[in-house]
Amino acid sequence: MNNLTSVCVFCGSSEGNDIKVIDEVLLLGEKLAEQGITLVYGAAKIGVMGKVAEGALTHKGKVIGVIPDFLKLKEVVHLGLTELVTTDNMHERKMKMHELSDGFITLPGGFGTLEELFEIITWSQLGLHQKPIGLLNINGFYDHLLQLLETMVRNGFLKMDNYELLLVDDNIDRLLEKMKEFKPTQVPKWLKSDRT
């Protein structure tokens, strides 16, 4: 059983055009707050990012935002967070978010969201961490991505063990339960690292 005291959420800085996404994102923030799980995210007050923070803060949750200095503009950064961490660049931002988190959840987003998801799952594949990685597939948003991953498995580019590192559900409670019950696979000795 994983002790999820903090979860990093990867998501878009745009709201998109599906109201179901916004409703679920607010609910995720609320549920994290209710369970005493700190939300770690990219510190924006706009888009899906702003909504997940709003959901947590409205229900007295702890929210830590991590943002690189060049994005720290008044119209972007959320100034009502529990804690705001500023980094020198995007690479430091991702490292800090990783350090602060016991697990990760990806919500709908664009290029940046996918980049964060695939970097953190690649780190897991390489044995650099053993933290659970969840994908909240709201309203089928990631159906086509999951089909692509299945194609990668069928075509021999992705091992099933690594495919299964990604915990997928369209229900928040079930996804959090899967993350708490996650047991990391054993990585080859030559891939093991002191970084966990």
Image (cartoon, helix red, strand yellow):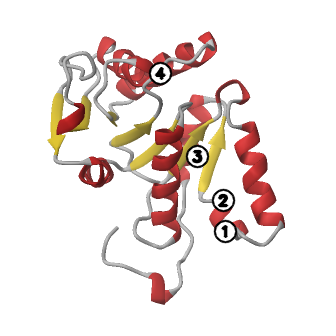
Residue 119, numbered label: none
In the picture as drawn, the residue positioned furthest to the front comes out as: 70
> What is the three-letter code of the residue carrying label 2?
Glu
Q: Rounded to the nearest whole Å, what is the CA distance between mark 3 and mark 1?
A: 16 Å
Q: Nearer the viewer, residue 106 or 176?
A: 106
The residue labelled by disc 4 is 14
Q: Residue 138: image x %, image y %?
A: 64, 27
> What is the three-letter code of the residue carrying label 1?
Asp
Can you say whether 87 is above or below 190 in the image? above
Q: Quadrant of residue 144?
A: top right
Tag 4: Cα neighbours inside 10 Å, few (<14), some, or many (≥20)? some
Q: Quadrant of residue 29?
A: top left
Q: Residue 178: image x %, image y %?
A: 58, 46
Can you say whether 3 is above or below 164 in the image? above
Quarter of the image that includes the C terminus:
bottom left
Q: Rounded to the nearest whole Å, what is the CA distance between mark 1 and mark 2?
A: 5 Å
The number of callouts visible is: 4
Do the CB atoms of the residues marked 1 and 2 lie less than 8 Å apart? yes
The residue labelled by disc 2 is 164
Q: Residue 107: image x %, image y %?
A: 53, 33
Q: Rounded to the nearest whole Å, what is the CA distance between mark 1 and mark 4?
A: 33 Å
Identify the secondary structure beneath mark 2: loop
The residue labelled by disc 1 is 161
> What is the three-letter code of the residue carrying label 4?
Ser
Do the CB atoms of the residues marked 2 and 4 lie less than 8 Å apart? no
Identify the secondary structure beneath mark 3: helix
Q: Nearer the viewer, residue 86 or 55?
A: 86
Q: Residue 148: image x %, image y %?
A: 75, 51
The residue labelled by disc 3 is 178
